[in-house]
Amino acid sequence: MKTKWISTIMTRMYLVKLIIRIAVFLMVFVLYVTDKEHMMSLMLTPVWMGISPMHVLWVMFMVMMILHIFPLERVTMALKKAEPEPYQEVEGYSELELHQFVQQQNVRAWCVMLVWLIFNAVFGALYVFNIIGIPDMLMLTVFYFLCDYICILFYCPFQHLIMKNKCCVNCRIYDWGHFMMFTPMLFVQNFFSWSLFFTSCVVLIRWEVIYAKHPERFWSGSNKTLQCVNCKDKTCQMKRRIMRN
């Protein structure tokens, strides 16, 4: 039996943002393929010497992260679980089951972190030994930028192989995306790269602090908002159709 596709404001928003990310990836990829040296010079050029496409890219990345640190009212349900207003308590939920859920998710989350750091340490080593350069690390970052939404809409290896959460709305590590995206920038020592990486760390720390203080917001067994019947995002539908096919 086929699942009927239900279009929501959020699913349409995700698709529009995916198209934007594809466009950004393609523009950077064209520059990467045609002129790596020019790409590197644009990244290293101070803003007072003229606005370059890399400065525009930096601003876009920074605004994106700032909106996660100081979210506007209209955010996805996956992010809303970090806020107090949408929380609807499930009456009589088991605190023991919540504690067990938190422990299980924490172990899986740090497994994801370990896998991610080991994976990116390979690129870090290649960069340190001058096998790859700054343009390669930036291209890797933009690739992660695109993969972030591929994971949300189509397939997420962390969800299926490690976290085992049923959807992005219930994902324990949903707001780790920026940290993962800008991990390659840790190895490139300039303002452009480090400002992005360390701002992403702020996003990650904010999420983890809220999770530690209010785990009940992150579990569908204690938060009605996260239950399928109340979901308005419906981003899981595309993944389910792909998995069935």
Image (tube, rainbow, N blue to C red):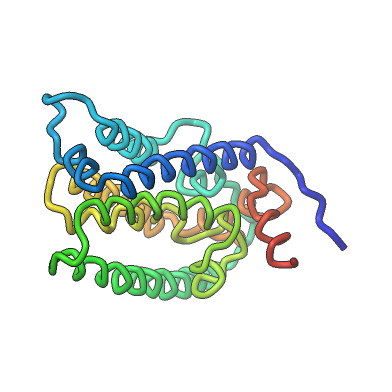
Q: Quarter of the image for the N terminus: give it.
A: bottom right
Q: For residue 35, which quarter of the picture? A: top left
- List x then y, in percent, for residue 86: 56, 41
Q: Residue furthest right?
A: 1
Q: Residue at x 19, y 46 (%)?
A: 37
Residue at screen point 21% across, 66% down: 124
Q: Is residue 163 left or right of residue 209?
A: right
Q: Which of the two residues, 4 or 20, is positioned nearer the viewer here?
A: 20
Residue 244: percent from left, percent from top: 74, 67
- Depth order, front residue of 198/102: 198
In this rendering, would 1 be left or right of 128? right
Give coordinates of residue 233: x percent, y percent.
64, 45
Q: Quadrant of the C terminus?
A: bottom right
Instruction: Tell me what residue is drawn at x 50 percent, y 70 percent.
Output: 163
Question: Residue 131, relative to residue 154: is it above or below?
Answer: below
Q: Nearer the viewer, residue 29 or 231?
A: 29
- Residue 129 relative to residue 31: left or right: left
Tell me which residue sits at (56%, 45%) in the image.
77
